[in-house]
Image (cartoon, rainbow, N blue to C red):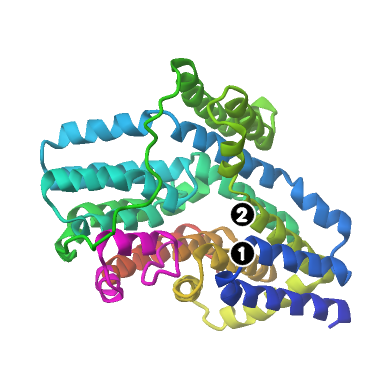
């Protein structure tokens, strides 16, 4: 092992440790960028390659889609849908729960943030609970479960943004024998979405504790704005989103790269006044974008020094001893799931998705299944408030304890694990 490769692996491991324990003290994006700059200063990564990450097409695509999605959120679409749910339910708790669960599942296909989608719907759901005289504890967990598990399922804007990130990792590790497209994620995840909705609507309410709201537990999440856009801007908000989505789906036919379509849509949202400049910058979610840029730089360094191949070979030797497609899938699912109970899911995903790509490259295997297993396993980690920002919000609104989370979470975890590993390792086998 060369000294350059050794230095690269040491920085990589320290970055992983930083993700695990440093996330309490600073943003994951800062840790990733520190790791990238350490690669530059030690000569593992060229300055030109590091700088190129900030102009990477996938990073621009993600930022643009965040702005377009926030523009849609500023319209009255969500409010109109909620009013329709209340009208159709006619006082039925199950119908109200079903309506809001489906609404959250739909929102997560457009807005790539479970906490944002959860925060949009919860004020409406709490109003419904007050109207029905039902404690929020009966509804909050099923809606939170839906939010954290249903993202990136349908071939819409959130999945398109994620595909860009995964493709960036494929290119960084020089493993382009396989490509992933938006329909691969849909094909892999649709059974999970179906079983989660069934659990949330028909099964989980039976196991929810019936608790009165905690004192001073008014929901402080993102509420729908009472300020309405002008009719012209309302149409622009809807229209831009639809045009961008259609443009991305048919980008190859149009001959226009997806990042250009997303960037143009984001600029139109700002230029038309649907979002002001400050709101657009906030909507870009630069923490996620810079986390991707830093992770991409580290990935490029690992690939350039040969460290990626070394790590991949080591993982492959461990995995191949199992010699069973479904046991391998279960292992690849369980390890990040456990770690996500103690680390933010985005950090765990940023660690393991590249590791799984290295593993598959070493084995000459299809990386699509393992990467999607990684995505789902980090989403369904909802047993502790460290896993995802949705969990502490659920605990506050539903007045849940850690013991409640464990009792409520066991059944959906078992069901999702069986369905996820069984289905994905069948349609995207690794061996």
Looking at the rendered image, the quarter that the C terminus falls into is bottom right
Q: Going 39% across and 35% down the picture, which residue do you hit?
A: 225
Residue 406: image location, x then y, percent: 29, 74
Looking at the rendered image, the quarter that the N terminus falls into is bottom right
Indicate yes or no whether the magenta region holds residue 221: no
Indicate yes or no whether the magenta region holds residue 397: yes
Q: In the image, is residue 42 above or below residue 196?
A: below
Label 1's element? helix
Q: Going 52% across and 61% down the picture, which residue do you hit?
A: 369
Label 2's element? helix
Q: In the image, is residue 65 above or below residue 142?
A: above
Evaluate whether residue 177 shows in this view: no
Q: Nearer the viewer, residue 231 or 216?
A: 216
Residue 132: image location, x then y, percent: 12, 45
Evaluate whether residue 278 shows in this view: yes
Mark 1 crowd level (few <14, some 14–19, many ≥20, 10 Å Cα): many
Position of residue 106 in the picture relative to residue 314 (left or right): left
Q: CA distance from mark 2 to mark 1?
A: 8 Å
Residue 45: image location, x then y, percent: 84, 64
Q: Are marks 2 and 1 in contact (CB under 8 Å)?
A: yes
Position of residue 388 in the picture relative to residue 2 (left or right): left
Q: Which residue is mark 2?
A: 287
Q: Going 71% across and 60% down the picture, which residue do you hit?
A: 294
Q: Which residue is mark 1?
A: 28
Q: Which residues are magenta?
A: 379-408
């Amino acid at each position: 092992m060369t000294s350059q490769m050794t230095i690269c692996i040491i920085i990589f491991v320290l970055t992983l440790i930083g993700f695990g324990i440093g996330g309490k003290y600073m943003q994951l994006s800062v840790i990733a960028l520190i790791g990238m700059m350490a690669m530059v200063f030690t000569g593992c990564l060229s300055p030109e390659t590091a700088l190129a990450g900030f102009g990477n097409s996938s990073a621009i695509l993600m930022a643009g889609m965040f702005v377009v999605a926030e523009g849609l959120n500023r319209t009255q679409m969500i409010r109109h849908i909620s009013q329709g749910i209340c009208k159709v339910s006619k006082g039925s708790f199950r119908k109200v729960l079903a309506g809001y669960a489906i609404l959250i599942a739909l929102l997560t296909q457009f807005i790539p943030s479970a906490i944002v989608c959860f925060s949009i719907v919860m004020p409406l759901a709490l109003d419904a609970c007050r109207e029905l005289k039902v404690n929020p504890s009966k509804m909050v967990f099923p809606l939170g479960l839906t939010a954290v598990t249903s993202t990136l399922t349908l071939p819409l804007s959130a999945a398109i943004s994620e595909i860009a990130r995964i493709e960036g990792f494929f290119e960084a590790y020089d493993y382009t024998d396989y490509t992933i497209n938006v329909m691969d994620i849909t094909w892999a995840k649709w059974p999970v979405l179906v079983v989660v909705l069934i659990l949330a609507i028909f099964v989980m309410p039976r196991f929810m504790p019936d608790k009165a709201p905690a004192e001073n537990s008014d929901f402080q999440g993102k509420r729908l704005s009472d300020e309405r856009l002008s009719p012209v801007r309302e149409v622009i908000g809807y229209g831009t989103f639809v045009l961008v989505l259609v443009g991305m789906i048919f980008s190859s036919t149009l001959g226009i790269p997806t990042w250009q379509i997303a960037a143009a849509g984001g600029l139109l949202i700002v230029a038309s006044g649907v979002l002001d400049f400050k709101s657009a910058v906030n909507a870009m979610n630069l923490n996620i974008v810079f986390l991707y840029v830093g992770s991409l730089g580290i990935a490029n360094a690992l690939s350039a020094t040969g460290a990626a191949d070394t790590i991949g070979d080591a993982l492959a030797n461990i995995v191949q001893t199992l010699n069973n497609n479904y046991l391998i899938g279960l292992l690849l699912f369980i390890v990040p799931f456990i770690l996500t109970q103690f680390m933010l899911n985005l950090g765990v995903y940023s660690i393991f998705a590249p590791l799984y790509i290295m593993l598959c490259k070493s084995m000459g295997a299809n990386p699509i299944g393992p990467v999607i297993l990684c995505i789902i396993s980090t989403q369904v980690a909802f047993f502790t408030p460290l896993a995802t920002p949705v969990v502490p919000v659920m605990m506050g609104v539903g007045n849940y304890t850690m013991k409640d989370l464990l009792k409520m979470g066991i059944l959906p975890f078992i069901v999702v694990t069986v369905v996820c590993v069984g289905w994905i390792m069948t349609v995207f086998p690794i061996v």
